Image (tube, grey):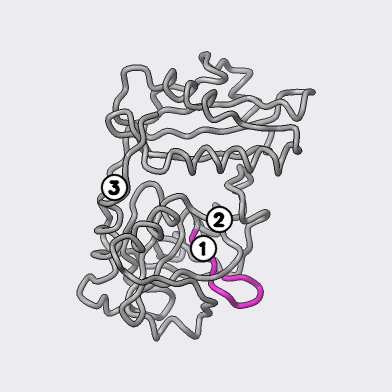
Amino acid sequence: MARVLKIEINGRPADVQDVHRVATWNYGHFTSMQVREGAVRGLDLHLQRLNRASQALFGEGATDDGDRIREFIRHALGEQRAASVRVTVVPQVGAPPLTDVMVSVSEPVSDAPQPALRVRTTTYERELPHLKHVATMGLTYHWLQAREAGFDDVLFVGRDGVLREGSVWNVAFWHEQQVVWPEAAVLPGITMQLLQTALTRIGVPWSSRRLTLDDLPTLRAAAATNSHCPSQPLAGIDETVFPGDGGALPDALNTAWAEVPWDLV
């Protein structure tokens, strides 16, 4: 885990009461991003995510002004030009829909993929899956169970048998010379959205469709995508081992990712 360098709330240093409240009141939402040279890929999508989630969790009167949050991020970064940044929005004590914005700045995380991961599936559906909320006990429990069983990570399957999302990532597959994403109730990851737009731009076909465990043997490769890495290869899921297809999937994802522009904070 990257070392935390600074935590601010509403543009000021967080004190012990702030940290205690956020740690013990499990209600809020967040977004995580990688900053390089003071810029972020998909910054507008991160800000839109925060605004939509605030309205969903705190009511229509709650909005997260993009300019205000950008200023909080800039202030927390200070002279730090490369970092991992998490923006967490929580309700003000006794004053919803007013919110507090906590910005955590950590050391930057490499976007280079790890060795291909072995993943197992489990039946689990996140609450409010379209939101990146702080209620993460369920997904963390299943991730730890997978690790204890000798796997690297976990992929969630709905009670309907449809493949959904990984613990903290979206999953992409390679099938018949195109990228395929599961069509299900999942978090629309910022990296996934940026990749889909970029894949279209570079002429690589992609689609979303309903996928089940029975489909896994027909797929040629799989990768996890999130803010840390756009193309983390998966060696296998449960008993299915992917042949890899010569790196076609990571090549497509990495080529698309290189086309995504950086936005100054």
How many numbered marks are there? 3
Lower sequence index among marks 1 and 2: 1
Residue 192 falls in image quadrant: bottom left
| CA neighbours of label 1 inside 10 A, class few (<14), some (14 to 19), many (20+) | many
Q: Amino acid at mark 1?
A: Glu
Res 190 label = none
Residue 124: image location, x then y, percent: 61, 65
The residue shown at (34%, 64%) is: 117
Which disc is residue 187 wearing?
Answer: 2
Chain-order first, disc 2 or disc 3? 3
Image quarter in which the C terminus is found: top left
Residue at 41% across, 28% down = 105
Q: Residue furthest right?
A: 94
Start-end of magenta stretch? 157-166
Residue 134 among those drawn in magenta = no
Separation (CA) of disc 2 from disc 3: 20 Å
Residue identifier under label 3: 111
107 on left or right of 85: left
Q: Are marks 3 and 1 in contact (CB under 8 Å)?
A: no
Q: Which residue is mark 1?
A: 165
Q: Disc 3 and disc 1: Cα gap in Å?
A: 20 Å
> Could you tell me residue 75's position as x and y percent?
44, 18
In-image side of 222 versus 93 (left or right): left
Describe residue 234's horizontal placement relative to residue 238 as left or right.
left
Instruction: Tell whether label 2 touches label 1 (CB within 8 Å).
Output: yes
Judge depth for marks 2 and 3 and give the one in front. 2
| Secondary structure at numbered mark 3 | loop
Q: For the residue marked with disc 2, what is the amino acid?
A: Leu
Q: Crowding at label 3, few (<14), some or many (≥20) Cα neighbours within 10 Å? A: some
Mark 1 secondary-structure assignment: strand
Counting residues from the start of the chain, the first of labels 3 and 1 encountered is 3
Q: Is residue 75 above or below residue 119?
A: above
